[in-house]
Image (spheres, coloured by chain):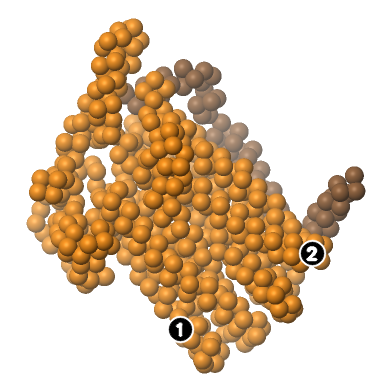
Chain colours: A brown, B orange
C-alpha cells in the first residue's frame, strides 16, 4: 500500500509541477483522442478482422485480390 | 485497381512516414546526448552539467510528447489501406512490430517518467540509469521497426504457405539479423544522432550569436560537436555498408541512385551531376548534362572491388548474358508461370483433384522466387523514378560530408579559437539544423522510392499490396493527416522556440 501511495505521489507531484508540460499534455490528449477514437473508430474502422470473421474467409478474400485479372 | 487509389494510398503512407520521421530522429539521438551530459554531471558533481541535462531534457520531452504515437497511424493504414500486404506478410512483419510495442516502447515510456519527474526523488545513480534506459529503449524501438523495414527490402527467413496465402516465418534469426536490416538500423539511427548533434550545436550557436548563456552554450556545443563528429563518421561508414547491401540485394536501386544506365567495370561515383531528362533505357542520349565522377568508387562501394562490373539499368531491364544478368522479361515470364500455378493449385484443390493440385504446387515452388514479377506487364516496370532517387541520394551524401566538416570546424574553433567571434560558423551551425532533417528524409526517399515498384522486394508490387477501397476516402484522410501533422509540427516548433528563448534558467 505504501509503495502504491509513493508511486501515486511521484506521478501526482510530477504532473503538478509541470510548466510547459501542461500544454504538452493537452496536445498529447487531443492527439491520442484523434488517433484512437476518431481515426480508429470512424476512419480506419474496416479491416480484414472486422469484415471477415473466419480465417478461411480472409484467405479467400486475399487469394481473390492476388489473382483477379491476372 | 484504380491508379489514383494506389497513388493516394502511397502518398498517404509517405506523408505519415515522413512526418513521423520528423519527430523520431531527435528522440534517438538527443536521448544519448542528455545521457552523456548527465553522466558527466554524476561523475563531476558540477551543477552546470545538471542544468545542461535538464534544459536539453526539456526539449527532448517536448519532441517526445508531440511525436509519440504518430507511428500508430501507419499501423492503422496497414490494416485498412494495405490489407493484402498485411495478410501476405503479417506473420513476419507483425512480430518485430509487436516486440517493439511490448518491449522497447514500454521500457522507454516507463523510465521516461523517472527521468523527467525523478530529480531529487530517486538516487542520482538510478536517475542516470533511467536516462540511459530511455535512450536504449528509444533505439530498441527503432531496431525492431527497421528490422521489419529491412525485411521488406530483402525478404528472408520465411516460407510462403500456398494454402494460407501467407508468408510464414521459418527462421527468426535470419529476419532479425539480416545484413540489410542491421545496416539499415545502424545507418538510420546514425542519422538521428547526427540530427540531434546539429540540433544541440545549432541552438547553442543561437545563444552565442545572441550573447546569452555563453558558458552553457559553449559546454553544450563541445559535447554536441564531439558526439556529432563521431556519429557523422559512423553514419558515413554505415552508409557505405548500406549501399554495399543495396548493390548485392537491390541492384536496380543502386543503378537508379547513380543514374547508371550502362553497366560498367571500374564504375565511378557521381560526386555531382545533373541528369539529362531525355535519357531513358531505350536511347543513347547522354545520361548527364553535367557530372563530376570519382573513378572506381562505385565498383568499390558496391562490390568491394575496383574492377567489379556494376550492372546498369539497361542490363537489369534487358539482361546481359556476359555478366549472367537475367532480363526482367524472363523474370516476368517465370513470375506469370508461378502466378498461374498458384491459381491452378487453389482451383484443383477446391475440386479435390489431388494429383493436379500437387503438380501445380510443385510448379509454383519451382518459380516461387519470381512470384512478384508475375504482376508486372512490361520489363521497364521494374524501374523506380530515376531522378527522384538520384537527387535524393546525392543530397543525402553531400549533406553528410558537410556535417562532418562542420563538426570538425566547430570542435577546432571551440578548442583553439574564440568561437563567439566566428559568426559565419555560428550561423552555419544554426542553419544546418533543417539540413539534417532534409538529409534524413532524402535517405528515406532513396530507400523507399528506390525500391519501387515493390512493396516487398521481388514478391509483391505496391499495386497488389493495396486494398481496393474508396479512392475518395483515401484522399480525404490524406488531407486530414496533412492538417493534423502540420498542426503538430507547428505546435512543436512554437513550444520548443518559446522554451529555447526562455533558456536554461527557465523551468519545464
Q: For the view shown, which residue lies furthest in the top direction?
A: B352
Query: Does residue A45 lie above or below B262 as drawn?
Result: above
Residue B231 locus on image (x, y percent): 48, 69
Q: Which mark, residue B409?
A: 1
Foreground: disc 1 or disc 2: 2
Residue in view at x 74 percent, y 77 percent:
B45
The residue that label 2 is drawn on is B123
Residue B370 locus on image (x, y percent): 26, 34
SS of the residue under disc 2: loop
Query: Does residue A70 lie above or below B376 as drawn?
Result: above
Q: Quadrant of the N terminus of chain B?
A: top left
Q: Is residue B48 visible?
A: yes
Residue in view at x 77 percent, y 61 percent:
B118
Chain letter of the residue carrying label 2: B
Which quadrant of the structure image shows residue B338?
top left
Residue in view at x 79 percent, y 64 percent:
B123
Label 2: how many Cα within 10 Å (few below 14, some 14–19, many 20+) = few
Which quadrant of the structure image shows residue B175?
top left
**How many numbered circles does the render carry?**
2
Residue B466 locus on image (x, y percent): 40, 35
**In the visual, does A38 lie left or right of B367?**
right
Q: Quadrant of the C terminus of chain B?
A: bottom right
Q: For the view shown, which residue lies furthest in the right direction?
A: A2
**In the visual, does B507 lie left or right of B138?**
right
Alpha carbons under labels 1 and 2: distance apart: 38 Å
Query: Does residue B184 lie above or below B419 as drawn?
Result: above
Amino acid at each position: 500500500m505504501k509503495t502504491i501511495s509513493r508511486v501515486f505521489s511521484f506521478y501526482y507531484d510530477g504532473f503538478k509541477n509541470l510548466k510547459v508540460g501542461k500544454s504538452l499534455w493537452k496536445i498529447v490528449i487531443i492527439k491520442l483522442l484523434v488517433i484512437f477514437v476518431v481515426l480508429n473508430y470512424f476512419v480506419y474502422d474496416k479491416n480484414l478482422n472486422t469484415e471477415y470473421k473466419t480465417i478461411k474467409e480472409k484467405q479467400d478474400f486475399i487469394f481473390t485480390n492476388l489473382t483477379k485479372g491476372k | 485497381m484504380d491508379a489514383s487509389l494506389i497513388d493516394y494510398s502511397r502518398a498517404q503512407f509517405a506523408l505519415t512516414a515522413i512526418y513521423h520521421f520528423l519527430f523520431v530522429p531527435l528522440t534517438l539521438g538527443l536521448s544519448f546526448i542528455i545521457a552523456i551530459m548527465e553522466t558527466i554531471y554524476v561523475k563531476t558533481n558540477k551543477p552546470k552539467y545538471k542544468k545542461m541535462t535538464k534544459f536539453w531534457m526539456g526539449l527532448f520531452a517536448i519532441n517526445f510528447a508531440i511525436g509519440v504515437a504518430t507511428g500508430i497511424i501507419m499501423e492503422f493504414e496497414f490494416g485498412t489501406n494495405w490489407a493484402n500486404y498485411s495478410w501476405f506478410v503479417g506473420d513476419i512483419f507483425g512480430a518485430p512490430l509487436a516486440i517493439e510495442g511490448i518491449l522497447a516502447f514500454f521500457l522507454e515510456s516507463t523510465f521516461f517518467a523517472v527521468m523527467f519527474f525523478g530529480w531529487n526523488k530517486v538516487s542520482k545513480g538510478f536517475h542516470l540509469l533511467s536516462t540511459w534506459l530511455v535512450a536504449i529503449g528509444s533505439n530498441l524501438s527503432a531496431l525492431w521497426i527497421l528490422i521489419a523495414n529491412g525485411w521488406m527490402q530483402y525478404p528472408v527467413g520465411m516460407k510462403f504457405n500456398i494454402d494460407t496465402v501467407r508468408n510464414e516465418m521459418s527462421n527468426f534469426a535470419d529476419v532479425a539479423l539480416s545484413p540489410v536490416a542491421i545496416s539499415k538500423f545502424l545507418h538510420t539511427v546514425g542519422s538521428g544522432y547526427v540530427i540531434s548533434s546539429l540540433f544541440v550545436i545549432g541552438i547553442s550557436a543561437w545563444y552565442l550569436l545572441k550573447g546569452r548563456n555563453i558558458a552553457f552554450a559553449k559546454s553544450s556545443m563541445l559535447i554536441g560537436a564531439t558526439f556529432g563528429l563521431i556519429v557523422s563518421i559512423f553514419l558515413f561508414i554505415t552508409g557505405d555498408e548500406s549501399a554495399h547491401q543495396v548493390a548485392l540485394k537491390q541492384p536496380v536501386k543502386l543503378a537508379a541512385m547513380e543514374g547508371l544506365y550502362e553497366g560498367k567495370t571500374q564504375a565511378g561515383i557521381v560526386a555531382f551531376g545533373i541528369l539529362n531528362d531525355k535519357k531513358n533505357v531505350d536511347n543513347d542520349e547522354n545520361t548527364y548534362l553535367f557530372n563530376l565522377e570519382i573513378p572506381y568508387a562505385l565498383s568499390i562501394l558496391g562490390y568491394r572491388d575496383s574492377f567489379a562490373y556494376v550492372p546498369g539499368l539497361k542490363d537489369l531491364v534487358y539482361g546481359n548474358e556476359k555478366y549472367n544478368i537475367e532480363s526482367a522479361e524472363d523474370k516476368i515470364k517465370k513470375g506469370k508461370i508461378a502466378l498461374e500455378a498458384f491459381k491452378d493449385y487453389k482451383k484443383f484443390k477446391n475440386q479435390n483433384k489431388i494429383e493436379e493440385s500437387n503438380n501445380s504446387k510443385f510448379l509454383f515452388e519451382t518459380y516461387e522466387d519470381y512470384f512478384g514479377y508475375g504482376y508486372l506487364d512490361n520489363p521497364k516496370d521494374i524501374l523506380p523514378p530515376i531522378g527522384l532517387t538520384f537527387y535524393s541520394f546525392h543530397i543525402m551524401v553531400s549533406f553528410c560530408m558537410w556535417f562532418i566538416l562542420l563538426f570538425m570546424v566547430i570542435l577546432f574553433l571551440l578548442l583553439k579559437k574564440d568561437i563567439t567571434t566566428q559568426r559565419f560558423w555560428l550561423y552555419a551551425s544554426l542553419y544546418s539544423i533543417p539540413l539534417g532533417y532534409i538529409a534524413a528524409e532524402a535517405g528515406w526517399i532513396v530507400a523507399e522510392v528506390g525500391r519501387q515498384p515493390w512493396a516487398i522486394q521481388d514478391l509483391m508490387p505496391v499495386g497488389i499490396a493495396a486494398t481496393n477501397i474508396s479512392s475518395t476516402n483515401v484522399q480525404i484522410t490524406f488531407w486530414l493527416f496533412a492538417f493534423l501533422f502540420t498542426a503538430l509540427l507547428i505546435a512543436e516548433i512554437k513550444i520548443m522556440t518559446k522554451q529555447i528563448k526562455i533558456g536554461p534558467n527557465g523551468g519545464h
